[in-house]
Image: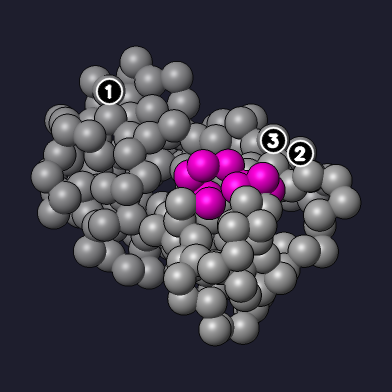
Amino acid sequence: MAQSKKSHAYGTTNMSAGDEHVTVAKLVNYSESKRHIAKVHQLFNQEDAAAMPLQFLNEDDMPIWRFSRNDKYSFRSAYYHLMEVVIENNHLMVEGNWTKMWKLNIPKVKIFSWRSLRECLPVNERLIRKGVQCDKKCLCCDLNRENEWHCFFGCKASQEVWIEVGMWDNLHQQIDNAADYKQPVFHLLDSLESTNMAHIVMTLWMIWCR
Ligand SMILES: [Zn+2]
């Protein structure tokens, strides 16, 4: 059923069986008729019925996309609806201050940061798990299996970078107690100014690009 424009993005009434094809125009073209207005109140809950412009009835019905604020379809709103409502995705959620991460003034490197925190980087440990034939050991130190934590914090080669840029003193205590790679990164994100956090992310990116 098409809906008229309202103060909120979409109606909250559950569709009753048999009325799926009733149009707004059918209901409100003769708004002076109490019979039609009564039908509106019969089909819609109080909030939805009150939001209908019953006195301005000359507009044609038009399709709307009820999952966006402006009633227009967008890939973003469809993706959001799928991920947040249709698909059970709690197991994919990564807790952390993503809003602050996306506001860092490092446009391209933010994508790298997102990939690393969503465990999408092709580190050796992940590649092997997916059946890719590659060296199990870190190419830099030849000691450990390469994962994000080792690549960015645990490897001697990466620690040399952190020392070189003067950030190692701030990092190493958090890293020693961290459960994984994401924990210290999000902790730093919470505790640092955006400019300093941008330097951290840029250093992570430089380590990855070595
Ligand atoms: Zn290493």
Tags 3 and 1 in contact by the CB under 8 Å rule? no
Q: How is the image coloured?
A: one colour
Q: Which residues are magenta?
A: 41-49
**C-alpha gap between disc 3 and disc 2:** 24 Å
Residue holding disc 2: 129
Q: Main secondary structure of the magenta part?
A: helix
Name the quadrant of the C terminus.
bottom left
Magenta-span inclusion, residue 47 = yes
Residue holding disc 3: 88
Nearest to viewer (mark 3 / mark 1): 3
Nearest to viewer (mark 3 / mark 2): 3
Task: Evaluate whether residue 37 shows in this view.
Answer: yes
Q: Image quarter for residue 188?
A: top left
Q: Residue 157's x, y, as percent?
A: 38, 44
Q: Earlier in the sequence, mark 2 or mark 1?
A: 2
- Is 6 or 193 nearer to us in this picture? 6
| Mark 1 neighbour class, 10 Å CA radius: few under 14, some 14 to 19, many 20 or more | some
User: Which residue corresponds to the image point at 45% horizontal and 19% vertical from the top-left?
Assistant: 179
Q: Is residue 200 left or right of residue 45?
A: left
Check disc 1 and give the amino acid type: Gln
| Mark 2 neighbour class, 10 Å CA radius: few under 14, some 14 to 19, many 20 or more | few
User: Which residue corresponds to the image point at 76% horizontal and 38% vertical from the top-left?
Assistant: 129
Q: Is residue 7 left or right of residue 201?
A: right
Q: Residue 86's x, y, as percent?
A: 70, 44
Name the quadrant of the N terminus.
bottom right
Q: Which SS class for mark 3? A: loop
Q: Earlier in the sequence, mark 3 or mark 1?
A: 3
Tags 2 and 1 in contact by the CB under 8 Å rule? no
- Is 189 or 150 nearer to us in this picture? 189
Residue holding disc 1: 174
Q: Which SS class for mark 1? A: helix
Q: Earlier in the sequence, mark 3 or mark 2?
A: 3
